[in-house]
Image (cartoon, helix red, strand yellow):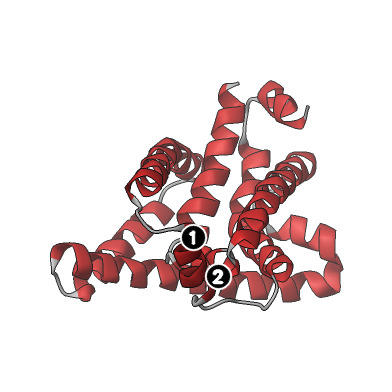
Amino acid sequence: MKTTLRVAGVYVGAVVGAGYASGQEMLQFFVSHGVWGIVGTAVTMILLPILGYHLVMLGDQLHVRNHKKVLYHLCGKYLGPVIDVALTFFLFGLGAIMIAGSGSLFEQSFGLAPIWGYVFMSLVLISTLLLDTNKIITIISSLSPYILVLLFIIVVYSIFASEASFATLESIASQQLTVSPHWTLSTLISVSFNFMVGFAIMVVLGAVEKDRKGLRMVRS
């Protein structure tokens, strides 16, 4: 059970913590489609755990030290390097978004210049990357419960504090920017986006996790 929760914690930390770092993801992927966006979130909640499960199992079966072996296994020796470069640039861009978001947070919440947020987040990222894989996994999994608690508080507060009617909320939602004209495509893009976010850490987690019995519980 402990290993199962650890795996789940890492996945939640990677997807929720990084995949929705800017706050615009939820608006553009789901909120912009109104009621159908809720359906999209439900589909996402089904697909992401399934994909995450397969990533962990691949890492376990292939005994990888990094994500490249899994990429080459899935995409072949010719397409694999191309996807690897694309994934690297994707994750670099995601890191830039997180740093930019930190700058905005410092400015909006504390009235400080964004540069302080940039510096703070950059130092946190560099310090984290200097740690070994197991420590990084432990940090991510330990932060996930706090993320979930905060999300729960925000959801409950939003439900009971909002005085806007459903029609008003639907009108506001329709005015949001969207990544695609249809909710199904937005959902698939969101799943693909977050799959890329969690790809590298989940395949490595499957390989470095020492509790093989716990991994078998995840598999079952």
Between disc 2 and disc 1, whose residue precedes?
Answer: 1
* Identity, as a three-letter code, of the amino acid under mark 2: Ser
Seen in the image, is 8 located left or right of residue 184? left
Location of mark 1 (residue): 20
Residue in the image at 25% along x and 63% along y:
120
Can you say whether 45 is above or below 81 in the image? above
CA distance separating discs 2 and 1: 15 Å
| Secondary structure found at label 2 | helix
Can you say whether 52 is above or below 211 in the image? below
Q: Position of residue 47 (x, y in %)?
A: 72, 50
Q: Quadrant of the N terminus?
A: top right
Q: Which mark is residue 117?
A: none
* Identity, as a three-letter code, of the amino acid under mark 1: Tyr
Q: Nearer the viewer, residue 190 or 37?
A: 37
Q: Position of residue 177 (x, y in %)?
A: 52, 78
Can you say whether 86 is above or below 74 in the image? below
Label 1: few (<14), some (14–19) or many (≥20) C-alpha neighbours in 10 Å: some
The mark total stands at 2
Instruction: Decide if residue 62 is in sight here.
Output: yes
Q: Quadrant of the C terminus?
A: top right
Instruction: Decide if residue 65 is in sight here.
Output: no
